[in-house]
Image: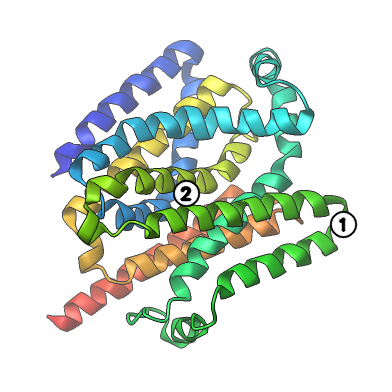
Amino acid sequence: MLKIFIPSLSVSVVTLFAVFMWGGFAALFLALVLVVLEVTLSFDNAIINAKVLAKMSAKWQQRFLTWGILIAVFGTRLVLPLCIVSAAAMLSPFAMLAIAFDDPKQYAALLETVRPAIGAFGGSFLLMVALKYFFNEAKSVHWILAVERHFARWGRIEAIEIALALVLLLGFSFALPELGATILSAGIIGIILFILIEGLAGSFDVETQGIARNGIVLFLYLNVLDSAFSLDGVVGAFALTAQLPIIAAGLGVGALFVRTFTVYLVRQKTLQTLLYLEHGAHWAILGLAGSMFAGLIAHVPEVVTGGIGLVFIALAYVSSRRRVVGIR
């Protein structure tokens, strides 16, 4: 089963070798650091993606690795930040692309100015993902029982997750009046995007209408989710280097590993055995959303953001293994 990693490993080795030939050991080291950063920040994303990917056909799972990785590398990690910075600086994407290659430090500085918008958008979207999971009154399996049981009861209140997200955005907009309009607009866009994608995904009944028919909707959902997870990491990458080729290579290799690991989880049916792993991933998402919101006030180191996710997933894994042993 580990042979699924061979193509990804081959692409990764070729990519990193190209980085070495282009920039030497210094460039290779930075690319490897970015690989670790991407994997650390996106490990919980792999678990959430695996749950969605299990509803898709083998063809769409393969497209998640092929088409999806192109979207992840060029779309989320290059084109999307470029468009966001272009809109904020009121310059054309082509002019911004020229700045990115001719003056990477200026591009990094411009990208830093849109961090509040990225934080509000990503934080709101991920908050909705986590709250939608916990505020589900039909959810019967709980990991942190004392908390999750009450969350499930709160789910009886219609659209409570939307109300809480909006209240949080209002609070930050009042606390940071100079960023109020940015926080509200970006955050509301994140909430609306989540609602639209959830609505589209929910409009297809997998059991009665077929997996292939809703494959495109779930595919889009996974890539939007990946964008929400990755945007903050893209901004953080510029703290290490302003060279776009190194950033694209490092984050791209990391994203490829995470996506391959996601397919591996699905085919091994890991989530069916380790029941609390999904819970831990959603707690990690809640922590990531919190760190993105906290980033509106003060800089949150990427090691803290990634560490939160790893701790929750590690604890959930241990709890799941204990449950399996207990059942046996």
* Relative image position of residue 228 (x, y in whole percent): 53, 48
Would you say 244 lies left or right of 220 here?
Answer: right
Residue toward you, 43 or 129: 129
Would you say 100 lies left or right of 138 here?
Answer: right
* Relative image position of residue 134 (x, y in whole percent): 46, 74
Q: Is residue 84 visible?
A: yes
Residue toward you, 266 or 254: 266
Residue toward you, 95 or 9: 95
The amino acid type, in three-letter code, at marker 1 is: Pro
Query: Residue tagged by mark 1?
Result: 177
Q: Residue at x 43, y 76 (%)?
A: 136
Tell me if residue 242 comes above or below residue 309 in the rendering. Answer: above
Q: Residue at x 33, y 71 (%)?
A: 276
Q: Residue at x 44, y 48 (%)?
A: 42
Would you say 166 lies left or right of 27 here?
Answer: right
Residue 311: give its label: none
The mark that comes first in sequence, 1 or 2, is 1
Q: Secondary structure under badge 1?
A: helix
Furthest toward the right, the residue is 178
Q: Is residue 120 visible?
A: no
Q: Residue at x 37, y 78 (%)?
A: 143
Tell me if residue 261 comes above or below residue 35 in the rendering. Answer: below
Query: Residue tagged by mark 2?
Result: 225
* Relative image position of residue 123 (x, y in whole percent): 61, 56
The amino acid type, in three-letter code, at marker 2 is: Leu
Q: Secondary structure under badge 2?
A: helix
Marks 1 and 2, how far apart in space? 28 Å
